[in-house]
Every structure is written in C-alpha cells, then in structure tokens.
Amino acid sequence: MMMSYEVTDKDLKEAETRHIESLDPFILKVFPAKEKKKYVLLTYIIKLFKKGVKYTEKEINEILKPVYEDYVIIRRYLVDYQFLDRLDNGKAYWVK
C-alpha cells in the first residue's frame, strides 16, 4: 500500500496542536483515524530512527513505547506507509 500526501505547514501546525503532546521527547496525545493525519504524524515519528541502521523489532518497540501507548499500531503504519521497510520474517527493520 503506497500512500503519500502533500504535507503543508498548516498540516504540521494542526498536528502539533491537536495530536502531539510534546516534541522533545516526542509524545502523541492521540493517533488520528484519518489517513492524511496519520501520515503527517508518521513524518515526525520516522525522525526518531537513523537511516542506514538495521533495527530489531524489540529496538523499534523500545523507541516507539514512549511515543504512544499503542506503539504496535505505530510500527505497523510505519511499515504500511513505507517509512520503514522490514524483512519478511520481521527480524530487521530499517528506514526506507
């Protein structure tokens, strides 16, 4: 599923006021249902990961746990929206 949206300054400001509790450390208040709003938040979340680094699922979870209670859904969306790629067996993840 390839999804990509044009993200505007207005989208970022709305995300910061409505959905983000803190930018440093990054913490979400809510993870919205609307696809574009999810995408906007994922553009923030992917910055928590380094390009060129292979992560285990456990490492991904440890990074995402402080961000949002349902960190598993965040991990899933990072893969679904192609911010992260992974091996089919889930043994390694990396920034696309």
Image (cartoon, rainbow, N blue to C red):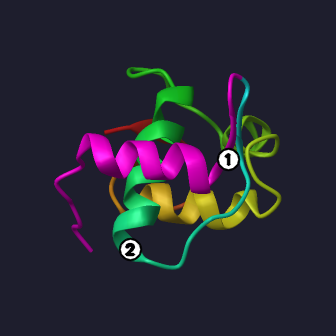
Please name the residue shown 69% across and 22% down the image.
24
- Which quadrant of the structure image shows residue 27? top right
Q: Which mark is residue 35?
A: 2
Q: Position of residue 76 (x, y in %)?
A: 55, 65
The local crowd at label 2, few if under 14, some if 14 to 19, many if 20 or more residues have their Cα within 10 Å, is few
Between disc 1 and disc 2, whose residue precedes? Answer: 2
Q: Which mark is residue 2?
A: none
Question: Which residue occupies the foreground of this view, 10 or 58?
Answer: 10
Instruction: From the viewer's perspective, tell me whether residue 66 is left or right of residue 30.
Output: right
Of the residues shown, which amino acid type is indicated by label 1?
Glu
**Image: 76 above or below 18:** below
Image quadrant for the C terminus?
A: top left
Q: Position of residue 65 (x, y in %)?
A: 80, 46
The local crowd at label 1, few if under 14, some if 14 to 19, many if 20 or more residues have their Cα within 10 Å, is some
Between circles 1 and 2, the one closer to the viewer is 2
Question: Which residue occupies the foreground of this view, 22 or 38?
Answer: 22
What residue is pinned by disc 1?
A: 57
Task: Return the residue found at the far left.
Answer: 6
Question: Which residue occupies the foreground of this view, 95 or 67?
Answer: 67
Image quadrant for the N terminus?
A: bottom left
Judging from the image, what secondary structure is the residue with disc 1 in? helix
Of the residues shown, which amino acid type is indicated by label 2?
Glu
Judging from the image, what secondary structure is the residue with disc 2 in? helix
The part of the chain drawn in magenta is: 1-24
- Residue 64: tell me if it is visible: yes
**Image: 14 above or below 21:** below
State the CA–CA distance, disc 1 to disc 2.
Answer: 24 Å
Please name the residue shown 39% across and 44% down the image.
12
Instruction: From the viewer's perspective, tell me whether residue 60 is left or right of residue 14.
Output: right
